[in-house]
Image (cartoon, grey):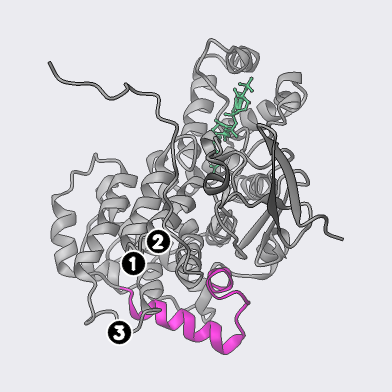
C-alpha cells in the first residue's frame, strides 16, 4: 500500500503542496521539489546529496537498512551463483537476462572489438610506467574517442561492445608495462581460450592478457578466474554512487560514452570511493608493520581530532552489512586456502573486523565492512599490484556505468546542474 501523493508544508505562513514520488517499494519515497524555487523562492540545501534523489532508475536497488542489493530485481546472492559477468553485463544493459542465443552473440560481438589501434600503442608507449594505473586507464579511455569513428562504430550499440572489449586490454597493457612484461600488441590482441564457455572466456582472457609470457602456454589455477569473475559481478553496479553519478552527469550533457566512462574512472580513483581497496591493504600493512596493535588504530579512527579513518568500513547507503562484503570475505578465504597461501593480512583483517563489530563507536554509527575491505586480499593473491586494485574495480563497474549512461539518454533526462548558496563577497569594485 502506498501513501499520500501530496505533502503539505508551510513557509512563512503560506501553505504549499508538493507531489510525492514513490519507487517500486513504497518506503522509497521522495518529495518532488522541481517547482519549489519557482513557487516559493527557496531551493533545498543538501551537501553530499545525502537526501537527494537525482533520478528515477530501474537498474539496481539497495536496501541499506536490510543490507540487500538487487540487479534488475535479482538478488546479488543469486546472480553470483547463477550468472557469469557477461550475463550480468547483458542484464544491466538490456534489462533482462539473455537466452543462449543472445548470450552467444553478445560474447561474439565483444570478441570482434578485441584489439586496439597502433596509434593507441604509440601513445601508450610514451606514458611513464610509474604513472598511477587509474590515471593511465582514464586517459587512454578518453583517448579512445579520437580513434572511434563511424568506420569502427557502425551501430550505436557497438560502442558498448567496443568498450567491454577494450578496457581489459588497456588495463592489461598498463599492468605489463608496470611489471616489465613484454608489450607486443599481437600477443595481447590474439587472446583466445579453448574453453567453450564463451562468456566465461572474458575473465579467462583478461587474466591471460595480464599474465601470459611469450612462448609459454598459459596455465592458471581455476580458483583465480572463478574469484575474479565473482569480483567483477559484485562490482558491476551500485546505483547512484559517486562514479556512476559522474557518468550520468556527463550523459546528461550528451557527452559521448567513452569520455563519460573516463570521467567515471577518475571519480572511482578517489580513496573514499573505489580507491579504498588500495587504501585498505596499505592500512592493514601499516598496522602489521607497526606491531599489529589493532586497538591503537581503532582509537585513532574514533578520535575526532585525527583524520584517520578505518578504510573499508562504512557506507553512505548501507546501515547494515554490505551484502557484497560477506561474499567477498568467503571468496578471499577460499582463494587463500586453495592456493595454499598463508596470509597474515587476511588473519589481521578478520581480527580487525571482529573487534570493530563489537565497538560501540562503530555500532552506533552503523559502520560495517564494505566491499573494499576484503577485495584487495584476493587481488594480491592473484598477483595484481596494489595500485592496480582500483583498475580491477573499474573493469567490473563498466557495465553499470554504461547502463546508467544509456538510461539517461533513453529517459531524456535534463542536464545535471545543481544550484548553490553563494557565500562569497557581495558585488564590489576594483580600486
Ligand atoms: N572510520 C571511522 N569513522 C567513520 C568511518 C570510518 N571508516 N566512516 C564513517 N565514519 C564516521 C564519521 O567520522 C562520521 O562521524 P560523525 O557523525 O561523528 O562526524 C560518521 O561516521 C558518518 O560518516 P560520513 O563521512 O558523514 O558518512 P558518509 O556516508 O558521508 O561516508 C564513507 C561514507 C565515505 C564510505 C565513509 O564511511 C568512509 O570514509 N569510509 C572509509 C573509506 C571507504 O571504505 N570507502 C569505500 C566505500 S565503498 C565504495 O565506494 C566502493
The range drawn in magenta is 86-114
- Residue 74 in picture, x, y percent from top left: 71, 66
- Alpha carbon distance from label 2 to label 1: 20 Å
Identify the mark nearer the N-term, 3 or 2. Answer: 3
In the picture as drawn, the residue positioned furthest to the right comes out as 1
**Side of 106 where 215 appears, left or right:** left
Closest to the camera, between mark 3 and mark 1, is: 3
* Residue 395 picture quarter: bottom left
Residue underneath mark 1: 166
The one nearer the camera, 99 or 197, is 99
At horizontal 27% and vertical 49% (from top left) the residue drawn is 136
Mark 1 sits near ligand 1, with its Cβ under 8 Å away = no
**Side of 370 where 212 appears, left or right:** left
Residue underneath mark 3: 154
Q: Secondary structure at mark 3?
A: loop
Residue 250 is labelled as: none
Identify the mark nearer the N-term, 2 or 1. Answer: 1
The one nearer the camera, 165 or 428, is 428
Are the residues flagged by discs 3 and 1 in contact, CB closer than 8 Å?
no
Assign ligand 1 to one image quadrant. Answer: top right
- Residue 292 in picture, x, y percent from top left: 58, 17
Q: Secondary structure at mark 2?
A: helix
The chief SS type of the magenta part is helix
Residue underneath mark 2: 251
- Alpha carbon distance from label 3 to label 2: 20 Å
At horizontal 50% and vertical 17% (from top left) the residue drawn is 307
Amino acid at each position: 500500500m502506498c501513501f499520500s501523493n501530496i505533502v503539505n508544508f508551510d513557509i512563512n505562513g503560506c501553505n504549499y503542496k508538493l507531489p510525492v514520488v514513490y519507487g517500486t517499494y513504497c518506503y522509497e519515497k521522495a518529495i518532488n521539489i522541481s517547482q519549489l524555487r519557482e513557487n516559493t523562492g527557496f531551493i533545498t540545501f543538501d551537501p553530499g546529496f545525502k537526501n537527494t534523489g537525482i533520478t528515477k532508475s530501474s537498474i539496481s536497488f539497495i536496501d541499506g537498512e536490510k543490507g540487500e542489493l538487487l540487479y534488475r530485481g535479482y538478488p546479488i546472492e543469486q546472480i553470483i551463483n547463477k550468472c557469469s559477468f557477461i550475463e550480468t553485463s547483458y542484464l544491466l544493459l538490456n534489462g533482462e537476462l539473455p537466452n543462449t542465443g543472445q548470450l552467444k552473440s553478445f560474447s561474439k560481438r565483444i570478441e570482434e572489438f578485441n584489439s586496439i589501434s597502433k596509434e593507441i600503442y604509440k601513445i601508450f608507449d610514451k606514458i611513464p610506467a610509474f604513472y598511477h594505473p587509474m590515471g593511465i586507464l582514464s586517459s587512454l579511455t578518453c583517448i579512445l574517442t579520437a580513434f572511434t569513428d563511424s568506420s569502427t562504430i557502425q551501430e550505436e550499440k557497438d560502442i558498448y561492445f567496443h568498450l567491454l572489449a577494450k578496457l581489459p586490454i588497456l588495463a592489461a597493457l598498463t599492468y605489463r608495462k608496470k611489471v616489465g612484461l613484454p608489450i607486443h600488441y599481437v600477443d595481447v590482441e590474439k587472446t583466445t581460450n579453448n574453453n567453450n564457455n564463451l562468456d566465461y572466456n572474458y575473465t579467462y582472457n583478461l587474466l591471460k592478457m595480464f599474465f601470459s609470457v611469450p612462448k609459454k602456454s598459459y596455465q592458471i589455477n581455476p580458483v583465480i578466474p572463478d574469484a575474479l569473475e565473482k569480483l567483477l559481478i559484485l562490482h558491476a553496479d551500485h546505483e547512484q554512487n559517486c562514479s556512476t553519478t559522474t557518468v550520468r552527469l556527463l550523459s546528461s550533457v550528451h557527452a559521448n560514452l567513452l569520455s563519460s566512462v573516463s570521467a567515471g574512472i577518475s571519480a572511482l580513483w578517489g580513496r573514499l570511493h573505489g580507491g579504498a581497496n588500495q587504501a585498505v591493504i596499505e592500512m592493514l600493512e601499516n598496522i602489521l608493520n607497526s606491531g599489529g596493535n589493532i586497538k591503537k588504530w581503532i582509537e585513532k579512527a574514533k578520535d575526532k581530532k585525527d583524520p584517520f579513518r578505518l578504510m573499508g568500513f562504512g557506507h553512505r547507503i548501507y546501515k547494515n552489512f554490505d551484502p557484497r562484503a560477506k561474499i567477498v570475505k568467503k571468496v578471499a578465504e577460499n582463494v587463500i586456502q586453495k592456493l595454499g597461501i598463508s596470509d597474515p593480512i587476511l588473519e589481521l583483517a578478520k581480527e580487525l573486523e571482529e573487534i570493530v563489530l563489537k565497538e560501540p563507536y562503530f555500532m552506533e554509527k552503523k559502520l560495517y565492512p564494505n566491499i573494499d575491505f576484503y577485495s584487495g586480499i584476493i587481488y594480491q593473491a592473484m598477483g595484481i599490484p596494489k595500485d592496480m586494485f582500483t583498475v580491477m574495480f573499474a573493469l567490473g563497474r563498466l557495465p553499470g556505468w554504461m547502463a546508467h549512461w544509456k538510461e539517461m539518454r533513453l529517459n531524456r533526462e535534463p542536464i545535471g546542474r545543481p544550484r548553490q548558496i553563494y557565500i562569497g563577497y557581495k558585488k564590489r569594485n576594483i580600486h
